Amino acid sequence: MGARQPENTRSFALCAHGGAGKTSLAEAMLFCNGQITRMGVVQNGNTVSDFQSEEQKRQISISTSLLTLERNGKMLFALDAPGFADFTGEMSAAIRVADTAVILVSSVGGIEVQTSRAWEYAEHHNAPVTFYISKMDRENADFDKVLADIKSQFSPNALPVFLPIGAADKLKGIVDVIKNKAYLYNLDGTGKFTEGEVPADLADAAANAKEALLEAAVEMDDELMEKYLEGEAISDQDFAKMLKKAIAARRIMPVLTGSATQNVGVHQALDFITEYFPSPVDIGAIKAQDGDKEVEVLPDVNAPFSALCFKVMVDPYVGKLSFIRAYSGKLSSEGNNIYNVKKGDDERISSFKLMCGKDGKDVKEIIAGDIVAIPKLQSTKVGHTLATKGGASYLFPHIEFPKPVYSVAVVAKTRADEDKMGNAISKTLEEDRSLTFEKNPETHDNVLSGMGDMHLDIVLSKMKERYGIELDTKTPQVPYRETIRKTAEAQGKHKKQSGGHGQYGDVYIRYSPLERGAGFEFVDSIKGGAVPNNFIPAVEKGLREYMESGPLAGFPVVDFRAELYFGSYHEVDSSEMSFKLATRLSFRKGIMDANPVLLEPIMNVEVTVPDQFMGDVMGDFNSRRGRIMGMEAHGKLQIVKAQAPLAEMFRYAIILRSMTSGEGTFSMEYSHYEEVPADIAKKVIAAHKKEDEEDE
């Protein structure tokens, strides 16, 4: 490959709503570039990007796939990211490490929920954006409408560089407005085309489009701007230079178009990417944190090597693959280790792999801008910064993943499955950062949480395939709490005489409610030594122990004060244990006398839906004992902010998808605890008492 330079590198993430054609476009790019001899079809499960068994079975992308292409002396790294809401974390990570986000918008379906999510991620990372209006061969394809929507909903900086010649069954090719040429295609998927003049009916549109590009480009240079305003001609060379600069600065967001399945316009898209997409040098320095100070990392091959791990994948043949984006320096695989700055560990490098789907080509050296996979790194996880020991000491900001919105409790089918569960889940969490797992100490459920039912279904299928473990699922238990609503006093007296030393402990405790979220407070108000000082800690310890299982339904008791104000003891028979047992008697009686109630967790929920589903979503929240807290418009989408009990939200991901034809998304986080309505509390208490009886 010779001595490569970051100036000759292009990296881009293909992002969109599911079904907009990202994987088909990636496949057509590989075909046009001569890397495959036949284009695979998503529905046939034979594309380069969708190589995992679950992807082939379900005919969707579930994991970001890295494709490496060499074209016209440039190295291209394409990240084909999933488009379904359940796998949005993969899209976020891909946009984070790529230099450009290519957002596909279907010419038929237009802007959809995940299109907006891709735009938001690109905005958040200040990434240059190119739009690709796809599926121009489909019935009802409408380039002009979709372009207008992109401009109004996302940015007026979206300017077409390609125009379609015809649409649907009349699609003939594309016009390149920069070169002022038409490319007419054979609609047979071969990608063969002839070059010609711009059709007369598109001449004005092409001229106007180029003028808009020129106006925006010259704004990047005061001298050129002055020449342009004075009516002087701008050379093609200056125009190209400023266009590239404007794309890197997000001043121009090019709009490409074509048909991936018919292989129309893909050659020109690849050439545009190669010629105009920003290189790491055009993007410039990125920020990192070195202790308390912020540093800027330049894509300089002579600087110390540094990289960020953005993805981990377990390959059935190679084992663990860590995908990294190099940001500075260069590194050889021969005689070098790589240093995990986050963990402080040395990692052995066996090779660097330029990936194309599941296949990797070994290279000996990588440079700033490269996106490669490294096999068998042990301690490296997603978000870790890598360098050479004694080199870069800074850390790149961690990769943000969306919070899980759907949870199930997992139960091992057999004892053997139980033994394997910890290892299988640990490895799966390492690979998929949008998953969480916790053993709830209150309900004792093993709770696996992700982005939706499809996400968790695929995760469990993978675990069965890879680790031979079968897990059943059930709805998690709600971590209810118990509290009191009034003040009550209760004596607890434990007295036992049975030969030798007896047992004696006597306490009077006053129980009173505290404000929500205050926790537990113990007050020692003993006077005159009614309870000796050495036994008082046993009373507090007993209370803290017994409050973990309340008298109503066995849930932790919270938000109350316990004041020990009187008691008695025996010189010989009193002991710490006696006072703990006395405390238990007081606690059970006192809490029941203080009007105990059940509390449930309330969640903050934020739902993003198209306008037409607003009524359904709001009505559904009312049926879930929810409260609408506010609404705000976001283009054609509405954001509904609400609060609802966790007990009503376990299956909301499935309900929302069904209610909105897959177009709704939501996020959810804990807010506070509230009292459970009496009729529902009765059912919960009865159910738990029944469980206790069955367990006995």
Image (cartoon, grey):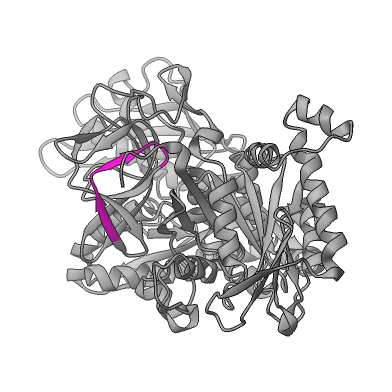
Q: Nearer the viewer, residue 687 or 374?
A: 374
Compared with residue 27, is residue 640 higher up or lower down, i.e. above or below? Answer: above
Q: Nearer the viewer, residue 487 or 360?
A: 360
Quadrant that contains the C terminus: bottom left
The answer to whether any part of residue 109 appears in the image is: yes
Q: Position of residue 378 (x, y in %)?
A: 21, 45
Res 422 → quadrant: bottom left
Please state if 575 lies on the left or on the right of 560 as rendered.
left
* Residue lying at 58% horizontally and 68% vertically, measured from the top left: 18
* Residue lying at 22% horizontally and 65% vertically, measured from the top left: 418
The answer to whether any part of residue 596 appears in the image is: no
> How many marks are shown on the rendered structure?
0
Compared with residue 153, is residue 337 higher up or lower down, i.e. above or below? Answer: above
**Residue 365 falls within the magenta-colored stretch:** yes
Q: Position of residue 93 (x, y in %)?
A: 48, 49
Q: Which residues are magenta?
A: 360-369
- Give the main secondary structure of the magenta stretch: strand
Q: Nearer the viewer, residue 126 or 272?
A: 272
Q: Residue furthest left?
A: 500
* Residue lying at 63% horizontally and 72% vertically, measured from the top left: 194
**Residue 180 falls within the magenta-colored stretch:** no
Res 225 → quadrant: top right
Q: Position of residue 142 (x, y in %)?
A: 78, 72
Q: Position of residue 517 (x, y in %)?
A: 57, 37
Compared with residue 169, is residue 513 higher up or lower down, i.e. above or below? Answer: above
